Amino acid sequence: MANDYFRFKQFLIRQDQCAMKVCTDSCVLGAWADVTGAKRILDIGAGTGLLSLMVAQRNPEAQIEAVEIEVVAAKQAQENISASPWADRVQLFPVGLQDFADIQPTPFDAIISNPPFFQASLKSTDAVKNQAKHTETLSFSEIISFAQHFLNPDGKLHILLPPHEAKVFEREAHQLGFFTNGILWLEATPHGKLLRAIHTYSRQPSAPSEQVLAVREKDHSYTAAFRELLKEYYLIF
């Protein structure tokens, strides 16, 4: 059973009211996505506010906006943001991405998201988890279309998905004028099962760089590469 909170070196995430808890793959996304030099960053589907606070820690110049449609999660995300050292730089909007687009936000330099990804899977009896996990509330095409309108010409879109869904998203992104610039494949152990894929997209064509990150060694200890990536966040490193 997940803890009611997760303490990082510089901030605390309370998560007892959120369907989606702090997880390893989201932490990797927050630490790996390139937000260097970004002045405005958008976090789509903020959940607990984890990604917003991770990028706020990494980029002290950025103004961050976050959208979260689920009312209770948005309330807890706001509490986490308000209690953090960067409350003055992170603004939460308790709305869906479609409603957020209607206010015509100023274009962003970076967009980061761990979006819903189940498209044809059996749903649970938990409506809140279904909203967080299933694409009926936020489709891949809606994310890409938003990026078309509200991502600066040289901006970057960072998306975390399971490997199969990442390929589906990639096909749609390419069809709508985005190029894959980088991929991080996240695996449980070296040469083990692929857990997730993080893709970076932009409108600028380039040969995509590919990396593989294993979370743990065969003996269950964290790998050196994982420790290096998360050393500014995890208390145990």
Image (cartoon, rainbow, N blue to C red):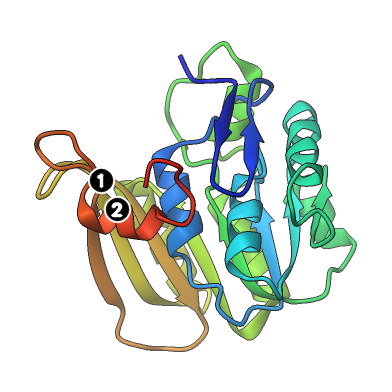
Of pointers 2 and 1, the one earlier in the residue sequence: 1
In the picture, the disc for residue 13 is: none
Query: On the image, which quarter does residue 150 sit in?
Result: bottom right
Residue 20 visible in the shown view: no
On residue 226, which mark appears?
2
Q: In the displayed orientation, state which residue is furthest to the top.
A: 125
In the figure, is residue 164 to the left or right of 142? left
Residue shown at 66%/61% (left/top)? 56
Element class at badge 1 = loop
Q: Is residue 154 above or below residue 144?
A: below
Q: Position of residue 103 (x, y in %)?
A: 90, 62
Closer-to-camera residue (179/141): 179
Instruction: Give the number of marks.
Output: 2
In the image, what residue type sits under mark 2?
A: Phe
- On the picture, is 227 further left or further right than 104? left
Please give the label number shown on residue 215: 1
User: Do the residues bearing badges 2 and 1 touch, measured as CB atoms within 8 Å?
Assistant: yes
Q: Nearer the viewer, residue 135 or 228?
A: 228
Q: Residue at x 84, y 69 (%)?
A: 105
Q: Give the secondary structure at mark 2.
A: helix
x, y percent for residue 7: 56, 36
Q: Nearer the viewer, residue 85 or 30?
A: 85
